[in-house]
Amino acid sequence: MGVREDTQNPAPADPRYPPRVIVVVGCGVAGLSCAVLLAEAGHAVEIWAAALPPRTTSNVAAAFWYPYQAFPRERALRWAGVGYRRFVELAERPETGIALRRLVDLYREPQERPWWADAVPGYARLSAQERPAGFAEAFGFTSPVVDTRRYLPWLIERFETAGGRVIERRLQRLDEALARAPVVVNCSGLGARTLASDPEVFPIRGQLVHVDGPPLDDIVLDEHGPEGLTYIVPRGDHCVLGGTSEAYDDDTAPRPEDSAGIVERCARIDPRLRDAPRLAEVVGLRPGRSSVRVEAELRGEGLIVHDYGHGGAGITLSWGCAEEAVALVTAHLGARGVI
């Protein structure tokens, strides 16, 4: 999967790819979603990325649908709604690794419907008997769970089937991609701090613990606990426990004290998790920003469309942001009489 290339040299010419190739920078879920839509629309597309799956932040994510700290809210609601509908459709295809599960959304104080509830059908208040002890409120809805071990390879296969090409290549500047293509889609995540010269981008450290069992049906989320973020995500062959959300922390080494805290918080919700065998402890750096950036930037004769800064909602917003990014590309090419 992918083509390895000398990072000091431009992508080699290939007769299969005409001069109007579009370069997508980044091979996480944002970049792959954009690349798939562009390739399936008939464009010649190359993905350039310093790291390919499974070495991306998207691979580490617990990856269930939930617009966690997604801003600005009006746009995030639209993007999340698009993503929800697409993931529900894709769940009908077992090869995607997407499953639909009930998410139990817990609150420690009385709560009205959250701002994003209209993005999902069937969002409903649960009875006191349906929520764990110690919580004042709980809501339930069906949430897609995305097994990134299967979903990201499936996206790559879909992209390559549409004629796309994946190149493992580290960039120093987006202008390197513009030298190859008149249109570049920047889905570089945390790398946008350098590539897009965007000081607003910052790392948000997230640590997870993977455990063996017990068999669970529901995702359970406590976003507002005083000791930190807590979630339980069943994935079929194992369960993902989370998590941490530490802004401006770029340490990718697992911390034993974090793992102990995660397991303890999750075990208060389901005591069976306290002694579940641990399979892995993983850390990912979410690309934080005050607001998600999906916008077009003219640079000389070229166009850069940015799609990054998704924080903890990369999976949730991926298809909605990709649709908007592709629409910006299409509008630009149409205005220039290319399509």
Image (spheres, rainbow, N blue to C red):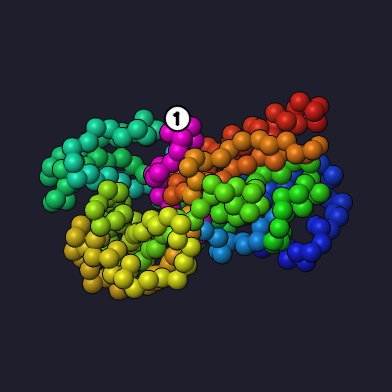
In front of the other: 45 or 48: 48
Q: Quadrant of residue 247?
A: bottom left
Q: Is residue 337 above or below residue 318?
A: above
Picture residue at 30% right of the left edge, 49% below the top: 223
Horizontal side of residue 133 vs 139, given as left or right: left
Horizontal side of residue 13 vs 46, given as left or right: right
Kind of element beneath mark 1: helix
**Residue 131, x across and y down, in percent:** 17, 47
In front of the other: 48 or 235: 48
**Residue 315, x across and y down, in percent:** 48, 48
**In the image, is residue 67 part of the stretch drawn in magenta?**
yes
The answer to whether one can see residue 163 in this image is no
The quadrant of the rendering that contains the C terminus is top right
Q: Is residue 272 above or below residue 16?
A: below
- For label 1, the crowd category at 10 Å Cα-Cα, with few meaning under 14, some 14 to 19 and many 20 or more, is few
User: Start and end of the magenta stretch?
Assistant: 58-83
Disc 1 marks which residue?
74
The quadrant of the rendering that contains the N terminus is bottom right
**Residue 242, x across and y down, in percent:** 34, 59
In front of the other: 276 or 26: 26
**Residue 207, x across and y down, in percent:** 39, 63
The answer to whether one can see residue 312 in this image is yes
Picture residue at 81% right of the left edge, 49% below the top: 179
Q: Amino acid at mark 1?
A: Glu
